[in-house]
Amino acid sequence: MRILLAGATGAIGRSLLPLLVAAGHQVAGTTHAGQLDLIRRLGGDAVVMDGLDAGSVRRAVQSTRPEAIIHQMSGLARVSDLRKFDSAFALTNRLRTEGTDHLLAAAGEAGVKRFVAQSYCGWPFARVGNAVKTEEAPLDPEPPRELRRSLDAIRHLEDAVTRAPEVDGVVLRYGSFYGPGTGWFEPAVVEQFARRRVPLIGEGNGWWSFVHTEDAAAATLLALERGRAGSVYNIVDDEPAPAREWLPGLAAALGAAPPRHMSAWLARVLADEHLVVMMTQSRAGSNAKAKRELGWQPRHATWRRGFANVARLIGA
């Protein structure tokens, strides 16, 4: 199958591209100028594309003639300070809205039949009921102010992809990423843990789901080949956990001292309501549907072992 991998040099794209090639697919990977050699080393054809420029997207799709598009575009690199969440995710939000619209429009013109897109599993869920949610659970109707634009962008992407009449659209809600040099193991984040700048807020009752980038890539390949059109899948590991467990666990894996404790009211003053919500009220996701329908089994089944393995790889 001819595939256009939009965002081929991102956290998932770097692991996904060689998997696609090994599975026998012909892959064209997009990036801004400067990382073309990386795409070629991973086995793909390199294409320069600006995901926020409709003309650039249209030219990339027309020149590569894909049968499927995988949307992994984001602006998450080096996002380590979540206090200004709205600003930190501004580019990602545009790629989830404008970028998604450009890709879908170009896909429709080119007759692309398959479209797989990246979303997020965790804090977007409504903060009611069970701690672990399925894909059918409602999203938060009243998120904190700093999260509203990001949740609006997520809703836009998921609705646009799953309801697109021209393509068989599939949405993957990845858990919080981690992997060598990625997500929670980016150097800036590791430094924050070393300096005890990531506190445990309140009772730490907010639940999170995690996924290793290699597992996320493997699930994406399966979703391309097996995912039901119009479906959403939570791509998360087997062990959702509250912040009171995973935050000290990550600090220990990194060889850092246990996180300091900060009351919720002080966190609201020093940071904002959204961080309090994420650490004390957020919900996690169940991976049962992805296992059942895609046949996916995460190799890093629990963040406990996954964190420790990545920490050893990076010499923490």
Image (tube, helix red, strand yellow):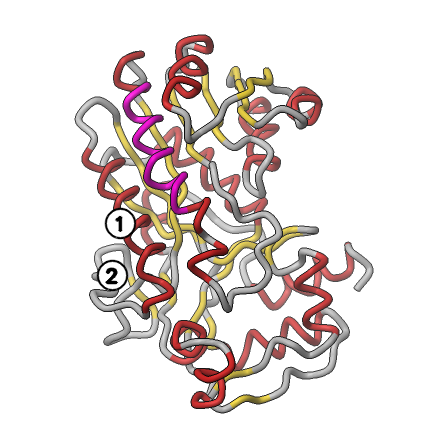
| Residue 195 to residue 25: above or below | below
In this rendering, position of residue 222 left or right of residue 233: right
Q: CA distance from mark 2 to mark 1?
A: 9 Å
Please tell me in which quadrant of the rendered image residue 55 appears.
top left
In this view, the residue in front, 304 or 48, is: 48
* Crowd band around label 2 with a 10 angstrom C-alpha radius: few (<14), some (14–19), many (20+): some
- The residue depicted at 27 percent of the width and 36 percent of the height is 161
Q: Decide which of 184, 229 is in the foreground and name it.
A: 184
The reply to whether the magenta stretch includes residue 104 is: yes
The residue type indicated by label 2 comes to Leu
Task: Classify the position of the C terminus by image quarter.
Answer: bottom right
Residue 78 in the image: state x and y as whole percent.
62, 52
Quadrant housing residue 306: bottom right
Q: Which mark is residue 155?
A: 1
What is the x, y in percent for residue 285? Answer: 36, 62
Element assignment for label 2? loop
Q: Residue at x 17, y 26 (%)?
A: 165
Q: Locate residue 110, reporting x and y percent.
A: 31, 12
N-terminal of the two: label 2 or label 1? 2
Q: Are marks 2 and 1 in contact (CB under 8 Å)?
A: yes
Mark linked to residue 277: none
* Residue 127 place in picture, x, y as percent: 28, 73
Q: Which residue is mark 2?
A: 139
Q: Residues within 10 Å of mark 1 (few under 14, many from 20)?
A: some
> Which span is picked out in magenta?
93-106
